[in-house]
Image: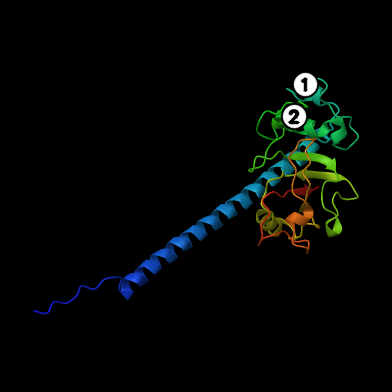
Amino acid sequence: MYSRKKQSGFTLIEIAIVLVIIGLLLGGVLKGQELITSARVRNLISIQDGYKAAFYGFQDRYRALPGDYSQASKVIAGVASGVDGNGDGFIKEANNENQYVWDHLSHAGFITGNYAFNTSDVSQYPSNPYSSPMELAYSNDYADANGTTPAGTSRHILKIGAGIPSDILAEVDRKIDDGRADQGSFRYSLNHNNGTTTGADSYADCTNGSNLWKTQTVDPNCGAAILF
């Protein structure tokens, strides 16, 4: 008797089903990555907005800048004696006022957490979601026109910390500013935090040569600042 040889391998229908399943899985992974990126972007924007609101709220209540307030230890419960600014209208790193900022804001109830001034303790700065300290100071650690860093003029800026991928900063910049790393209110920053070792990669590493944040070849350790 003639016996039919058993067919081996997959049929076209089976292969098509497998390809569809693979496509769905890849689509799910990509969608998941997109959702994670969006969440990180929203988180960074929310953090910035919160500290900006705290800065202006403190200024409105006390008619002084947090960190620079010369009467802080006398007026704000919990602020230790001597943790007072000089009242000159600038939050200066040289006077430790960039560290007093968080002490003043937290004890005045404008931010969560209990920050107490300590020159040797980096934990007394709030950290961004990438575990890098943030800083609010009168500083020129931001990019000027055409990427000159540090800039020629100091301003009050909120450095949102280093360790942030350049594509995340690109999306934040597009949502709240002009998308450029050298212009507007959101720019590249060195993020030198009071002598700590946490610093961002260079402007050239984080941008694409046209003053836009890198999004194709992503640099994982960039920094930015909000200019007040």
Q: Secondary structure at mark 1?
A: loop
What's the residue at 67%, 42% (across, down)? 128
Q: How is the image coloured?
A: rainbow
Q: Quadrant of residue 38?
A: bottom right
Position of residue 182 measured from the top left corner of the image (x, y, whole percent): 81, 57
Earlier along the polypeptide chain: callout 2 or callout 1?
1
Residue closer to the observer: 151 or 58: 151
Q: Secondary structure at mark 2?
A: helix
Residue at image point 65% right, 39% down:
131
Q: Name the residue at 77% across, 41% down.
A: 56
Q: In the picture provided, is 92 more to the left or to the right than 27?
A: right
Q: Amino acid at mark 2?
A: Asp
Position of the N terminus, as image quadrant, is bottom left
Whether 163 is drawn above or below 204: the answer is above
Relative height, residue 194 to residue 119 (above, below): below
Distance between the Cα atoms at labels 2 and 1? 9 Å
Check disc 2 and report the residue beneath it: 103
Q: Which residue is mark 1?
A: 80
Q: Mark 2: give few (<14), some (14-19) or many (20+) Cα within 10 Å.
A: many
Residue placed furthest toward the top? 81
Disc 2 + disc 1, Cβ < 8 Å: yes
In the picture, the disc for residue 97 is none
Q: Which percent across, then down, holds residue 9?
A: 29, 70
